Amino acid sequence: MSGSWLPTIAAMLATAVGLVVLWPLRAAGRRAPFMVMVVAVGVAGSALYYLVGTPEAAAPTARTGEPASLREGVVELQRALERDPQRADGWALLGRSQQALGNLAEANRAFARAVQLAPDEPELLVEAAQTRAQADPAKQFDDTALQWLRHAQRLAPGSERAGWLIGIAQRQRGQDAEAAATWEALLPRLDPGAATALREQIAIAREKAGLPAAAAPSAAATAAPAPALTVTVALDPAFAARARLRDDASIFVIARIPGGPPMPVAVEKHRLADLPLRVTLDDADSPMPTQPLSALNEVEVFARLSASGQANRQEGDIDSPPVRVSLPHAEPVPLLIGGP
């Protein structure tokens, strides 16, 4: 069978995926003691916020539910792969689509098959390693995931994502000095905002390893304050009156790249009891130092009511309509959860 089926199915899936939030969320509270990691990036990625620390991780999201068209597209893709199973790109697309549906075990298996067929594609290796970590019950980069990341780094020495995730894997193993060295090697390639955020994690790793603090960056690298985005979040009164909300429900405020890579660029977690909220998202809320809020000209912002108190999308979770804004943005961005 020819490979012409993949663009058609990819278009079907892309249309459906356009209706959902494919990208994961940061579950840590503001300025958490350790910025636990995200299984991020590739064309569609997933969070791994609780890989090192304790905050909950996040998973792919939908605004009000998972459209049937996405599930149907996955079924069609699975059938196509049964007929033409040697398509690495098809298996990778299946992995991303399963992620969008929250099927992490299936996504992991699909990415593993893609890597088996295309073992020398750096971005695929990184994406597969991230997915494998998120699918792991302990949210750990196991030896296979780490092997994929190191191979990706050998193939693409400039890969910031591979280097960042290798550092996370090292920290999980208690190799704090090695993690600090891995991340320090990334600093020359980062913009000032991303470098500042990464230095905070390097400082934590060095302290854990019993190493002296790194030299402070030059004044030129820290002179300009990073831009911030103010967001207000409220519940629609009619929705609040009729909804049965759990006392332990949480609110996640998320900024992401519109139609771009899956990494959320800033995320905060708050209690439902804190509503109405007024929060300020900045580089300190970035789940990945190599992709800070300050590096963007435009973001899409939305809020999620998580009935379970976890960032992973569960039945009953509600997302506000996303708002697209240009940066810098002076006025607060209003978000309404449960509105018409």
Image (cartoon, rainbow, N blue to C red):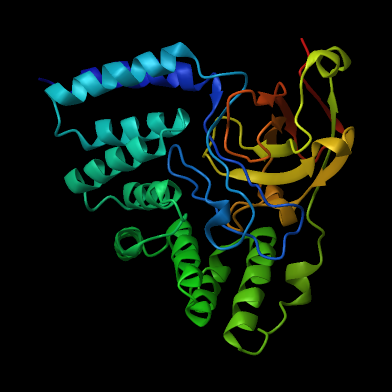
Q: Quadrant of residue 276?
A: top right
Q: Is residue 93 left or right of residue 203?
A: left
Q: Is residue 70 left or right of residue 310?
A: left
Where in the figure is residue 116, as x and y percent of width and height?
19, 47
Against 175, residue 259 (above or below) is above
Residue shown at 50% from the left, 65% from the top? 168
Q: Is residue 33 above or below residue 264?
A: below
All told, the count of numbered labels is 0
> Residue 275: x percent and y percent?
87, 34
Please say if 306 is above or below 77: below
Question: Which is more toward the observer, 114 or 319?
Answer: 319
Q: Is residue 331 visible?
A: no
Quadrant location of residue 202? bottom right
Q: Residue at image x 42%, y 18%?
A: 70
Q: Residue at x 68, y 63 (%)?
A: 197
Q: In the rendered view, would you say 173 is above or below 300?
A: below
Residue closest to the far top: 340
Q: Quadrant of the N terminus?
A: top left
Q: Position of residue 96 (x, y in %)?
A: 39, 34
- Quadrant assignment, res 44: top left
